[in-house]
Amino acid sequence: MESQQANGSHPIEGLMKTAMQSIKEMVDVNTVVGDAVETNDGSVIIPISQVACGFAAGGGEYELSDPNKKPGTPFAGGSGAGVSVKPVGFLVVRMNDVRLISVNGNPLAERVVDLAPQIMDKLDSLMQKKAQKKKVTEEYEI
C-alpha cells in the first residue's frame, strides 16, 4: 500500500482506467452515426442511434489477521460498465431531399409534415389559376 501511494497510484485507478478504455473502444462516433449505405437509385441511408453508458467502480482495504504478513493493507475492488445502443432512425439523403425517418413515432404524421410544402404549392397554384379564370371571365363580360 505504501509503495502504491509512493507511485501516486491506487489500485482503484487501474480498475477505472481499464473499464474506461473498454468503454472508449466500444463507443465511438460510428456507434451514434453509423456507416452510410448507398442504394441503387443513388440515395444514401445513414443509421442514427442513441447511446447510453454507465460506469461504476469501488473497492476497499482490509487488514490481515496475521501480523507477520507483508506490511500494508490489501486492496479488494471491482468495476463494471454497461452500454446501451438504441436505434433512433435513418437519415435518407436523395438528390434534393434530406429526410429523417424515425424508428418510433407516427409515420402518417411525419409523411404529412414532409408533404406540407408540396400541398401548399398545389393550393397556391390552384388559387392562382382560379384568380386568372375569374379575371378572364370578367374581361369578356365587359
Image (cartoon, rainbow, N blue to C red):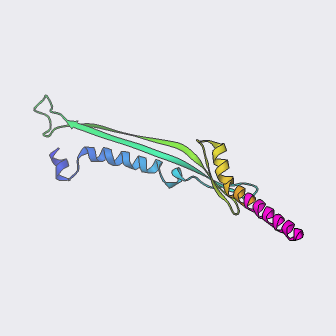
The spot of residue 70 in percent (x, y) is: 15, 38
Tell me the quadrant of the picture where the N terminus can be found.
top left
The residue at the point 36 percent across, 42 percent down is 55
Total of numbered circles in the picture?
0
**In the displayed structure image, the side of residue 45 where residue 15 appears, left or right:** left
**In the displayed structure image, the side of residue 129 where residue 20 appears, left or right:** left
Q: Can I make out residue 139 in this image? A: yes
The spot of residue 38 in percent (x, y) is: 69, 56
**In the displayed structure image, the side of residue 1 where residue 50 appears, left or right:** right
Q: Camera-side residue: 15 or 139? A: 139
Depicted 29 relative to depicted 86: above or below: below
The spot of residue 73 in percent (x, y) is: 16, 38
Q: Camera-side residue: 20 or 14? A: 20
For this orientation, the residue located farthest to the right is 140
For this orientation, the residue located farthest to the front is 142
Magenta-drawn segment: 123-142
What predominant SS class does the magenta segment belong to? helix
The spot of residue 11 in percent (x, y) is: 25, 44
Q: Camera-side residue: 109 or 124? A: 124
Q: Can I make out residue 75 in this image? A: no
Residue 141 inside the magenta-drawn segment: yes
Residue 97 inside the magenta-drawn segment: no
The residue at the point 28 percent across, 47 percent down is 13
Residue 40: quadrant of the picture: bottom right
Q: Camera-side residue: 84 or 116? A: 116
The residue at the point 17 percent across, 48 percent down is 3
Tell me the quadrant of the picture where the C terminus can be found.
bottom right
The residue at the point 55 percent across, 46 percent down is 88
Residue 15: quadrant of the picture: top left
For this orientation, the residue located farthest to the left is 67
